[in-house]
Amino acid sequence: MVSISFAYYEEWPVAIAAWQEALQDEYRRILEVIPADELCIQIDYCTELDHIGGAWAKLLPWVPDLPAEELFERYTSLEYIGPHLAGLPEEVRIGFHICCGTAPYYPVQPLDTIDLPVRLANAIQAASGNKVNYFHMPAMQDSGDEYFAPLADLTTGDATIYLGIEVNDGAEEMERRAASARKFLPEFGVAHYCGYMWNKEIMPGLLKDLRTGADHQADAVAV
C-alpha cells in the first residue's frame, strides 16, 4: 500500500482529477478481464468524512480547516462523486465504505451518532443517480440507541446497509450494538468497523466474532 500526500491545498483539484482519471482507466483494464456482472467496486470514503468532521485538519497541519457544510457539499456533489463512477456499466455492483479512519488510531474521527454517515450516504446516493448498491457505515464500541437512531433517516433506496458493528470487543458486544441498530433499521448486513489490514495478528478472532454476529443477525431478521 502506497500513501501519497499533497501538502499544498491549491494542488488538490488537479490531484483529485488525476486520481479520478486513473480510476476510470483502471476500471477499463479490469473490465477487460472481469465481466461487468461479476465485478464489485468499493469506493473508500474515509478522508472525506475525516475532513468534514474536523479530525483531518487537527491531525495534519497542512489540511485546511474549512466549514463542515462547505466540505459536505463539495464531497457529495455530482462533480466529485460522478467521476468516481464514470465508465462503470450498470451491471457492476458499487459500494461506498464510509469510514472514520484507522490510522494512526481508531477512530480518527469520533462520532457521537451515525448521523454524518447517514447524511453522506443519502447525498452520495442522490449524486450517483441511485447507482450505489451498498453502503458500509462505522460504529463505535459504545454505540447504542442514541448512536443508531439516525438510521431511520436513510433515503438510499434499495441499497444494502452494512454496519461496522464488529469493533474488536467480542460477539456479545457486537450483538448488543446490532440489537440497538435493529430498532431503527430492521435489516442490515454486519461488518468489521474497517479493513483487516491493521489487525493481522488478531484477525482470526475478529472473523470468528463477525461470523457469530452475522448468524445472530440472520436469526433475528428471520423471526
Image (spheres, grey):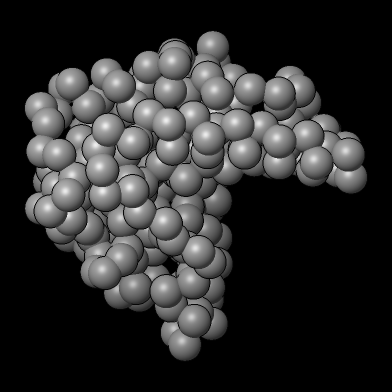
Q: In this view, does 92 lie above or below 4?
A: above
* Front residue of 17 and 84: 17
Left-right relation of 21 to 117: right
Left-right relation of 43 to 171: right
Q: Position of residue 30 (x, y in %)?
A: 79, 43
Which residue is painted at 86% across and 43% down in the image? 34
Q: Is residue 223 visible?
A: no
* Front residue of 61 and 195: 61
Tell me which corner region of the image, top left, top right, bottom left or bottom right, holds residue 24: top right
Q: In this view, does 5 lie above or below 11?
A: below
Q: Is residue 17 visible?
A: yes
Q: In this view, does 170 lie above or below 109?
A: below
Q: Residue furthest bottom?
A: 201
Which residue is painted at 76% across and 23% down in the image? 89
Left-right relation of 214 to 65: right
Which residue is painted at 30% across and 22% down in the image? 74
Tell me which corner region of the image, top left, top right, bottom left or bottom right, holds residue 137: top left
Q: How many labels does the image show?
A: 0
Q: Position of residue 7 (x, y in %)?
A: 26, 49
Which residue is painted at 18% across and 55% down in the image? 60
* Front residue of 206 and 66: 66
Q: In this view, does 169 lie above or below 90?
A: below
* Front residue of 28 and 106: 28
Q: Position of residue 172 (x, y in %)?
A: 33, 70
Left-right relation of 60 to 44: left
Q: Where is residue 145 in the image (x, y as percent from the top left)?
A: 18, 44
